[in-house]
Amino acid sequence: MGVGDFDVWGEEEDDHPRSLNVHMDAWATLADGVMSQLRGEMVDEVLCQVGSPNRRPRIDLLRNVEAMVSSIVANLVLLHRLRPSEARLAVPLANTKKTKYDRKGFQKLSPTIDALASAGLIEKFAPKFKQTRTTIRAVDRLHDAVMAADVKLSDVVRAGGQQNLVLTARPPRRYSYGIRVANSRVDYLETAETRLLRAEIDELNAFLSSQAITLKGEPSSAFNLWRNFTIRSTADPEAFRLHGRLYGGFWMILPEAERQHLKINGEPVADLDFSAMFPSLAYIRAGHPPPDGDPYAIRGLETHRAAAKAAMSALLSSGPLRSLPPRVRDELPAGWTLAKLRKAVIELHPVLASSLEQDLSLEFMFTESCILMTALLDLMRRGVPALPMHDGMMVPAANVEIASVVMRRASLEVCGQTLGVTQKTLLP
């Protein structure tokens, strides 16, 4: 598990998260009055450590501590109610320069975490050098409080001011000690293009927030979708032509078995996916229509479908490889090497030989995100709510037919080919 290997309330470039942990979302907070007594005690604990002894705390310090405590508790509500019991919350404690993406007033997050750990309200797990960030989880009475029956997911609301259009840049070295280095966020200039992109996301957020989205019969937490674009290098000009995926929906990190408990306006959801998105886009990029049949039918991996999908994704997404990526190696049967895998994929897809290991993931994600946004906005204007995933969406079951038609039409409009749409079976 590496620094870049967390599921997130927000961003994850890799489509194959390998950790149960999630990143803290500073913009998640608790509604007024929720757990007010315990929150007040937590604020007092923190002020004893970060404030000046025998003096009343400054108003700004008090407000900042209240905001940090509320956000920490809100994230722990989501963590313990939506994730497996062994999951933890990764907290950003590095002393870095703040940008317009950061919530103000969180400079003392590290001593706040330490104070709550000292009070026995959270358990803090130290980071491992070049491997994992600091993580926490609620314990004892704080854990009891976040799991109490009178605390609801809908008690988690959003603080104002979050950016819903994010531009990141890849670092000069994408990996250090075998661990992916996080992208840096770019303080881009506003243009007509950024205002249009932001307006689309604002409109989509407003529409979806007006729908009754429930999980196990309980109103969901507030959410704020945002798009993450990427440039390949900090030296590249600002542009919004790579990546572009949507993040920020609580449903995106739900285990697949939990999605059956989602309802939109009282209706169960149907999970719709574009079929074999990356292989299809690779064919289109190479000037060919997507092939009929199973693009993952790699000879020798007929009974290892997960390995075949991971292998295709890695070879189409990554740059030049010297060895098998760990997540691919772990899925493959014994005896498979990178050379053997390349040969088998080219044998199945000869027209893609020049597309392998060309670092195409950001291009594919961008096309995928444009198709998805086109479909989401079309459905919205028809009054049909759809919860975006990366390569598909969840819609009320009664709207499967129209959503499938709109998704196929969007793919034709964006990339000139009609992509297949399949309905996944939600696990019980």
Image (spheres, rainbow, N blue to C red):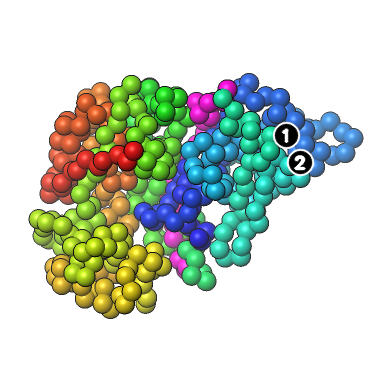
Residue under label 1, please give it.
42
Left/right placement of residue 409 relative to residue 360 reads left
Q: Which residues are magenta?
A: 150-175
Q: Quarter holding the C terminus?
A: top left
Which percent across, then down, holds residue 374?
A: 24, 38
- Residue 152 magenta: yes
- Residue 373's disc number: none
Which one is nearer the viewer's eye here, 208 or 301?
A: 301
Position of residue 355 measured from the top left corner of the image (x, y, whole percent): 22, 67
Instruction: Name the image quarter holding residue 407.
Output: top left
User: Is residue 322 visible from the viewing direction of this image?
Assistant: yes
Residue beneath disc 2: 119
Tags 2 and 1 touching, CB below 8 Å = yes
Is 125 contained in the magenta span?
no
Q: How many tags in the picture?
A: 2
* Amino acid at circle 1: Met
Based on the displayed image, in which of its 4 quarters is residue 65 positioned?
top right
- For the question of whether residue 27 can be seen, the reply is no
**For the residue carrying disc 1, how many other residues have a C-alpha within 10 Å: few (<14), some (14-19), or many (20+)?**
many
Q: Residue at x 47, y 63 (%)?
A: 180
Q: Kindly identify the amino acid type of the residue bearing the numbered disc 2.
A: Ala
Which residue is at a point 17% across and 30% down the rendered structure image?
402
Quick check: 166 left or right of 107?
Answer: left
Between circles 2 and 1, the one closer to the viewer is 2
Dot 2: within a 10 Å radius of its alpha carbon, few (fewer than 14), some, or many (20 or more) residues?
few
Q: Which residue is drawn at the image coordinates 15% and 41% (left, top)?
A: 408
**Would you identify the image quadrant in which residue 52 lies?**
top right
Q: Is residue 348 left or right of residue 118?
A: left
**Cα separation between marks 2 and 1:** 8 Å
- Point out residue 26 in the picture as x, y percentages from the top left corner: 56, 40
